Image (spheres, helix red, strand yellow):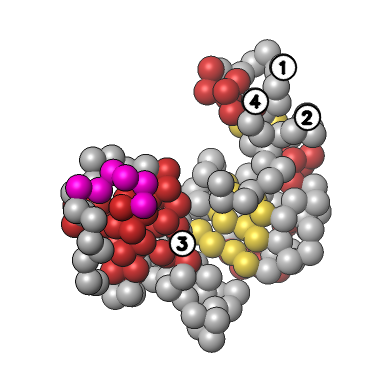
Amino acid sequence: KAGAKHITLVSLEGIVCEGETWMNEAQIEVSKKTNREHVRGTLKEAIHQADIFIGVSAPNVLTKELVQTMNEKAIVFAMANPIPEIFPEDALEAGAAVVGTGRSDYANQVNNVLAFPGIFRGALDVRATDITEGMKLAAAYGIANIITDEERNANYVIPNPLDKRVVPSVAEAVAKAAIDSGVAQITKIPRY
């Protein structure tokens, strides 16, 4: 739905690939929807010529050398906290064009606080009976659309959680998505 293709997941045991015998139930399910090329191996094989790395695992698992094998203008979101998979300065030095972390002391902090207040404000304002996938995707677009073309740069692709535009933008997008999907009991979008 969001347009991502060629997704490859890596666990401690290696690349999640349909048919691997070491996978748990969740990994088996995920393997049916990802890694269509059936790549096997480790993070080294998974990241080769990748456009984006999203890490939610452990400190220091991504090296400069691995980032250098990614495609040009690569994006690295190293989310492990407090020590990310790779520190932003190292990822940038290795050639990444955009880097984000879960840490507030670096640019492009990725934090769920960007989404939750607005999701609940929008859902509550229209008395939504459910939080749908469409509402979650709308929240993502609500966050993404905050930064103007003039503001956007490699160090500012994700708004600051304290930006006063975040909650109203997300709430409005979520309320509209709830109405459009039929889960809203109030069908007028509030003014934000």
Q: Is residue 182 magenta?
A: yes
Q: Nearer the viewer, mark 3 or mark 2?
A: 3
What residue sits right under mark 3 in the picture? 141
Q: Amino acid at mark 4?
A: Lys
Image-quadrant location for residue 27: top right
Earlier sequence position, callout 1 versus callout 2: 1
The residue shown at (68%, 46%) is 5
Earlier sequence position, callout 1 versus callout 4: 1
Q: Is residue 32 magenta?
A: no
Q: Amino acid at mark 3?
A: Tyr
22 lies above or below 13: above
> Label for residue 38?
2
What residue sits right under mark 1 in the picture? 19
The residue shown at (63%, 31%) is 33
Q: Does residue 42 appear left or right of residue 148 in this picture? A: right
Earlier sequence position, callout 3 versus callout 1: 1
Around disc 3, counting alpha carbons within 10 Å, would you say few (fewer than 14), some (14 to 19), or many (20 or more)?
some
Looking at this view, name the residue that lies furthest to the bottom: 150
Residues 136 and 151: in front is: 136
| CB contact under 8 Å: marks 3 and 1 | no
Q: Write down the region rendered in magenta.
A: 180-185
Q: Does residue 142 appear left or right of residue 150 in this picture? A: left
Quote the CA–CA distance across marks 3 and 1. 35 Å
Q: Amino acid at mark 1?
A: Gly
Specify the principal SS of the magenta part: loop
| CB contact under 8 Å: marks 1 and 2 | yes
Quote the CA–CA distance across marks 2 and 4. 10 Å
The residue shown at (64%, 25%) is 32
Earlier sequence position, callout 4 versus callout 3: 4
Q: Amino acid at mark 2?
A: His
Q: Nearer the viewer, mark 3 or mark 1?
A: 3
Quote the CA–CA distance across marks 4 and 3. 27 Å
